[in-house]
Image (spheres, rainbow, N blue to C red):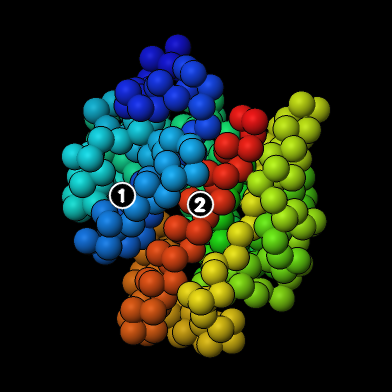
Amino acid sequence: MKSAHLTFTEEVRDALETNKPVVALETTIISHGMPYPQNIDMARKVEQIIRDQGAVPATIGIMEGKIKIGLTENELELFATRRDIEKVSRRDFAYMLTSGKIGATTVAATMIGASLAGIQVFATGGIGGVHREGEVTMDVSADLTELAQTNVAVVCAGAKSILDIGRTLEYLETHGVPVVGYRTDEFPSFYSRQSGYGVDFRLDSPEEVALMLQRKWELGIDGGAVIANPVPEASALQHGEIEGVIRQALDEAKERRITGKKVTPFLLDRIKQLTGGQSLETNIALVYHNAEVAGQIAAALKR
């Protein structure tokens, strides 16, 4: 019955049927993470980067009561331009599929879609996590619980800098999610290559990552893995500098009583303003880098 709720582009269907490497991509980053036209330019280039690694991109979204595994050019454009698109996480799937509304998948929702389609690797920007003052607000991203139970590896530039990274890593450890430093010993913090926190272990090649993932799932140890891939040095922001900007944006969000789903889009937009657009350039650079590494890992898994 699950497959009845999925639709595939011809490219993705062919890749899955012929056992080619496929990389899942989210749509929230297009609809809620970046302004137009940078978002559509980014979406197209990310798909091309994955193809350049010998893999097939599968951008996931919800439309017409179906989970779309792969989007057409027109559908990508729609996610980039429409303003009535809702963010979808695990709790929202049933409602979105029965309402017929258009939904952009978060990290958690994209992992679910990827898993249902048989895709093992997913490239994104940064994962969600425990929000700052999470011990008071109980604001913990569903991305973390999804990583604990769904067999999809998430290639990311760490957790978003706006989060409490220490508590995020503690949560992942408690739930047995391996945090792999890809060519790094330090957990990256999205805009910056540093965070002050370590990783569980370091791996330096797509083949090493693929072998680790294969062994994990062969053993029946359910759950994903965080493949923490730092933003390229040329595009990285200094950790201390971006931390000051984030604190200012967080204070403004609190003053305006912005909560729930609206927090992250507000913070990302405000940080972009406070850095004169530099944070957006960094965001785009790290997404491209993650797509490249994810394509290589997906290809290695198939080898």
Three-letter amino acid code at the position of disc 1:
Arg
Three-letter amino acid code at the position of disc 2:
Glu
Give the answer, above or below, for where 10 lies relative to 204. Answer: above
Give the answer, above or below, for where 126 lies relative to 114. Answer: below
Residue in view at x 59 percent, y 69 percent: 189
Kindly tell me whether residue 169 is visible in this rendering.
no
CA distance separating discs 1 and 2: 13 Å
Which percent across, then down, holds residue 13? 40, 22
Quarter occupied by residue 163: bottom right
Residue in view at x 38 percent, y 40 percent: 59
Residue in view at x 37 percent, y 71 percent: 280
The numbered disc on residue 2 is none
Q: Residues within 10 Å of mark 1 (few under 14, many from 20)?
A: few
Quadrant location of the N terminus in the rendered image = top left
Depth order, front residue of 222/289: 289
Depth order, front residue of 48/172: 48
Which percent across, then down, holds residue 170? 74, 59
Query: Disc 1 on helix, strand or loop?
Result: helix
The numbered disc on residue 44 is 1
Quadrant location of the C terminus in the rendered image = top right
Which percent across, then down, holds residue 223? 68, 37
Depth order, front residue of 4/123: 123
Residue in view at x 38 percent, y 72 percent: 281
Which percent across, then down, holds residue 141? 55, 53
How many discs appear?
A: 2
Going from N to C along the chain, the mark reached first, 1 or 2, is 1
Kindly tell me whether residue 228 is visible in this rendering.
yes
Name the residue carrying label 2: 292
